[in-house]
Image (tube, rainbow, N blue to C red):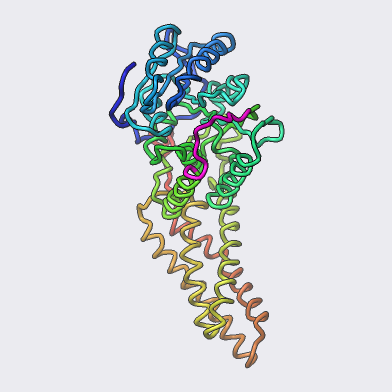
């Protein structure tokens, strides 16, 4: 069995993704490469690989390959993998000298020529009848990634209460902290198109169990399409996964990825897909591109910023005057508002010009400060001791008045759209 001691191969990390298109099978080349990461699985590896091979032979309409990625096993797993590769057509084994499921997947996926890359756990906890529905949306060009989910209503799952609680709690953490919308990050049953993996894998840092989650979070934030397949899943009672250690590493990963996303440190724009040929995707004459989406994003960010601003103002007002509390609350909320609008509303990613955008945002903040400060001054002139509720009402009104101007300045000055010449314009 080949031994691979080198890190994952260098993948093309530049350029943009092409429009989605169906994959064409090439004679003699595998369309699907299913990776099975293993560590000390000498007992289960043989029966599971034979079962998977038989299933693919009977049900998968294209050429396939099964790659056994041995994660530095210390038992007879390498010998079993070599015997399987010698006896079964389309099976190969790769030996890695370092442990880590993420490291194994990165290594094999980065070197595979198959247009669709998948992986599953060696215990085959997931019913194999879900394999073709998993990869079909990738073959057809509909989706970029696909995952099996045990948390769909139609999924049938057999596992203990502790694992059920840990799984649902973890996905709740992902939804609340990273705004993840996919339902099951940890199910060992996933697939990805190769051209997506080429650009996504260099951005994924984790080499262990958090690899799946990081891959999905970055793909989702980049706007890639993730297809979910309900699965039937039976827990392996002999699983060697250490729940506490895995959960701790996962939480560290959540913090690291969340921080990177918050500061715009990841160049996710290289993963953007262009629109396809559907006429509904084409720009209508006279309608600014993305205006409706930007308005929606700006309003959502504005609502959250206003709530944060009011909470900060109420907190600061306990120990200082109205003008000071207003200025401090507005400054902090404006910094957060500019960062959120930069990333979410106008789709600007990475650190390039981030400081410039914040400086421009602070100038816009000056307009808001003048409006809200002037409103408070007018209120103070009208009454000596205005009630707190009256102050908040005046501030809300002033902020609403500044919102339209703020959006126009953001769109036209702070985050202007970079226009790409139309092909007809270059003739």
Residue 228 in picture, x, y percent from top left: 60, 32
Q: Residue at x 35, y 23 (%)?
A: 95
Residue 397 in picture, x, y percent from top left: 63, 73
Given residues 412 and 74, the one toward you in this image is 74
**Quadrant housing the C terminus:** top left
Given residues 41 and 278, the one toward you in this image is 41
Q: Is residue 272 at least partly visible in the picture?
A: no
203 w.r.t. 52: above or below: below
Residue 240 lies in the magenta-colored region: yes
- Describe residue 58's horizontal placement relative to residue 409 as left or right: right
Q: Residue at x 30, y 24 (%)?
A: 4
Q: Is residue 63 at least partly visible in the picture?
A: yes
Residues drawn in magenta = 234-246
Residue 324 in picture, x, y percent from top left: 49, 82
355 w.r.t. 378: above or below: above
- Describe residue 161's horizontal placement relative to residue 114 as left or right: right
**Quadrant housing the N terminus:** top left
Magenta segment's dominant SS is: loop
Q: Quadrant of residue 97?
A: top left
Q: Residue at x 69, y 30 (%)?
A: 156
């Amino acid at each position: 069995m080949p031994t691979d001691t080198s890190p994952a191969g260098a993948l093309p990390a530049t350029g943009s993704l092409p429009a989605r298109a169906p994959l064409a099978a090439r004679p003699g080349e595998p369309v699907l490469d299913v990776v099975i990461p293993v560590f000390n699985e000498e007992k289960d590896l043989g029966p599971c690989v034979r079962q998977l091979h038989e299933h693919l032979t009977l049900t998968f309409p294209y050429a396939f390959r099964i790659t056994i990625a041995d994660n530095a096993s210390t038992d007879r797993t390498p010998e079993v993998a070599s015997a399987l590769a010698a006896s079964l057509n389309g099976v190969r084994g790769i030996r890695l000298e370092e442990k880590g499921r993420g490291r194994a997947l990165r290594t094999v996926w980065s070197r595979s020529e198959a247009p669709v890359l998948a992986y599953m756990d060696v215990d085959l906890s997931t019913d194999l009848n879900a394999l073709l529905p998993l990869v079909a949306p990738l073959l057809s060009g509909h989706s970029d990634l696909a995952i099996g989910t045990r948390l769909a209503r139609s999924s049938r799952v057999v596992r203990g209460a502790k694992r059920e609680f840990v799984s649902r709690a973890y996905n709740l953490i992902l939804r609340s902290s990273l705004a993840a919308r996919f339902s099951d990050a940890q199910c060992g049953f996933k697939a990805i198109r190769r051209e997506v993996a080429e650009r996504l894998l260099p951005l994924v840092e984790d080499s262990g169990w958090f690899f799946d989650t990081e891959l999905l979070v970055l793909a989702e934030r980049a706007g890639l399409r993730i297809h979910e397949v309900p699965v039937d899943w039976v827990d392996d009672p002999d699983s060697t996964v250490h729940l506490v250690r895995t959960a701790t590493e996962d939480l560290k990963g959540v913090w690291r990825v969340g921080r990177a996303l918050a500061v715009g440190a990841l160049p996710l724009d290289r993963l953007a897909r262009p629109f396809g040929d559907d006429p509904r995707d084409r720009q209508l004459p006279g309608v600014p591109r993305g205006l409706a989406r930007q308005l929606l994003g700006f309003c959502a960010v504005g609502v959250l910023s206003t709530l944060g601003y009011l909470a900060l103002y109420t907190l600061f007002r306990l120990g200082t005057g109205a003008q000071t509390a207003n200025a401090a609350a507005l400054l902090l909320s404006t910094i957060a508002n500019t960062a959120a609008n930069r990333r979410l509303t106008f789709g600007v990613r990475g650190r390039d010009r981030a400081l410039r955008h914040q400086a421009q945002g602070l100038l816009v903040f000056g307009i808001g400060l003048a409006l809200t400060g002037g409103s408070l001054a007018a209120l103070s002139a009208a009454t000596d001791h205005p009630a707190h509720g009256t102050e908040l009402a005046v501030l809300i009104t002033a902020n609403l008045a500044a919102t339209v101007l703020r959006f126009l300045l953001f769109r036209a000055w702070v985050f202007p759209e970079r226009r790409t010449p139309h092909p007809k314009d270059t003739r």
